[in-house]
Image: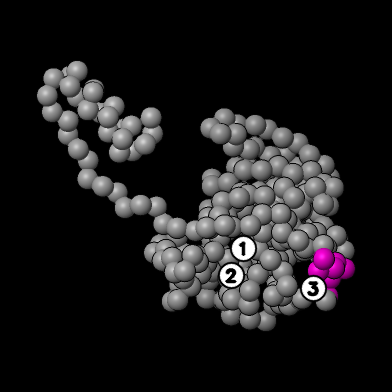
Amino acid sequence: MDIYVIMKQTFDTEEKIIIEDGNVSEDGVQYVINPYDEYAVEEAIQTRDELGGSVYVIAVGPERTSEALRTALAMGADEAVLISDERIGSDENTISKVLASYLGSQKVDLILGGYFSVDNGAGQVAIRLAQLLDIPHVGSITKLDMSDSKAKADRDAEGDLEQVEVTLPAVFTAQQGLNEPRYPSLPGIMKAKRKPFKQLTLDDLDIEEAELSPKTARTALSLPPQKEAGQILKGETAEQVKELVEKLRDDAKVL
């Protein structure tokens, strides 16, 4: 079974976000595998160990993304692919088209990814990829069972549970609770250095730069306003209500 995991490198969730000139400062920042993608990597490894085959981890991003891919190799993935090119934008439409261009030329039985990335939370890449490849997509899964050419999944449906069965190949995105991702071991880290690591650019894919026009654009980025101290309203109930309404209307501008 050929299992692919689509990955993204994101800020460590413990990092303090600093905005400079409308952009997030990357000075001294620690990057990690997107936390939801870790569940996808773990599920891919467990599936391979149970059914056989190979696990390929693939990402589209800058050169530093190789660190996240090597971490996935140390966890137990077999091969890594990094598609890095300054001509590739960062919006979900572009990323999904680049991934589809590569994966469309490969033998694929199963594609796993994170439910969404913690940096922008869009959750669009896997859905767009499934549409481009014309295969089923099931999001936010908490359980996955494989049988012959079909897969059954439990998915978190906003607090409820849905059970879905689809025919493979298919795309699944992992939700927290699917498994417990392993930590890379020292032997795993040493083995990762010898595992295949392929680096590609747009020139290696059957896709034209003109096809990669973004569908979304960020117009502004800012931190939320600092929290102000709470206020205690005094007086009779009617007076408190009147003062509260005035503050909501005149100060908070929500009425």
Type of the residue with mark 3: Leu
Q: Quadrant of residue 145?
A: top right
Rounded to the nearest angstrom, the CA distance separating label 3 from label 2 is 21 Å
In the image, residue 59 sits, relative to residue 36, either above or below, namely: below
Residue furthest toward the left? 235
**Can you identify the residue that label 1 sits on?**
8
Residue 209 drawn in magenta? yes
Q: Quadrant of the C terminus?
A: top left
Seen from the viewer's position, the closer of residues 158 and 43 is 158
Where residue 87 sits in the image (x, y, percent)?
Answer: 73, 73
**Can you identify the residue that label 3 sits on?**
202
Callout in the foreground (3, 2) = 3
Q: Quadrant of residue 28?
A: bottom left
Q: Which residues are magenta?
A: 204-210
Callout in the foreground (3, 1) = 3
The answer to whether residue 89 of the structure is visible from this angle is: yes
Type of the residue with mark 2: Ala
Q: Quadrant of the N terminus?
A: bottom right
Mark 2 burial class by Cα count in 10 Å: few <14, some 14-19, many 20+: many
Instruction: Return the disc, 1 or 2, that comes first in the chain's sequence.
Output: 1
